[in-house]
Image (cartoon, rainbow, N blue to C red):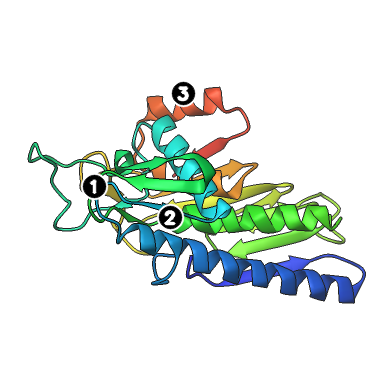
Amino acid sequence: MATPWVLRIGDEDADTAAWAAQEAFTLIDRLEEDLSRFQPVSYVSQLGRLRKNESLRVSPETYECLLLAKAVWQETKGAFDVTVVTPETELGETGRWSTQMDAFTLCQDSVVEVNRDRVRIDLGGLGKGFAIDEITQFFKDQEIACAFLDAGGSTLFALGSMPGETDGGWPASLGRHGMIALEDGALSASGFEVKGQHVMDPRTGQPVVTDRQRAWVLAGSAAIADALSTAALIMTEDEIADFCETHPDVSIMLA
């Protein structure tokens, strides 16, 4: 979260488009208050202050994000991890690096229980992608069939086609690698071209060592696309191939 947003709505009724955009930004603000670690009263921040065996009832959206984070963590064999390692939690009891993804349990009625002190969580891009998915569903519920959502330039979602576009879709940039037409789906990118070597491998606790400079993911869900675009910088080629084989709606491109 904590990212700039751009919404483009291709609705012939200007009043409807303006109303939908305002509702979308209201939704973004609400999700920011729930999901961002930069908000001291967010559910994510509150979880980070819990002591061992304490629990907290979170919002349904926060719970759904954590559920999704657990699923992607498992399916990427730990390459995607939303826990934050701090000096006091960097090493496990064995003296080796350990994830904290197993340090919180998702219980019934949107209750999250922790089994360690101060489990720090950063939903980051997953939260941003989740917000896009929520807005997209809202637009669909309101029968808005043409829109383009841009969260920070790194995660995009195209609903329908750009007005007047004869080839279908909305133009989406791959940076110096060109453009694609994006239609009824999400595109997310991660890499080192802007911020340098800033991605940590949660499986080793060390900066990622790879020849890859950029990863793009196409998926039906922006949350999934965002999570996988980071994980793809860490996963092996065999892991990426296996993931795409079991998830035919996902495409991963590397450069």
Q: Which mark is residue 44?
A: none
Whole-number angstrom distance, CA of label 2 to CA of label 1: 19 Å
In the displayed structure, 178 sits above or below 75; it is below
- Quarter-of-image position of residue 37: bottom left
Residue 127 percent coordinates (x, y): 50, 56
Secondary structure type for disc 1:
loop
Residue assigned mark 2: 123
- Pointer 3 or 2: first along the chain: 2
Q: Which mark is residue 116?
A: 1
The type of residue carrying mark 1 is Arg
Residue assigned mark 3: 242
Q: Nearer the viewer, residue 137 or 198?
A: 137
The type of residue carrying mark 3 is Asp
Check the image and name the residue furthest to the right.
13
- Marks 3 and 2: which is nearer the front? 2
Whole-number angstrom distance, CA of label 3 to CA of label 2: 25 Å
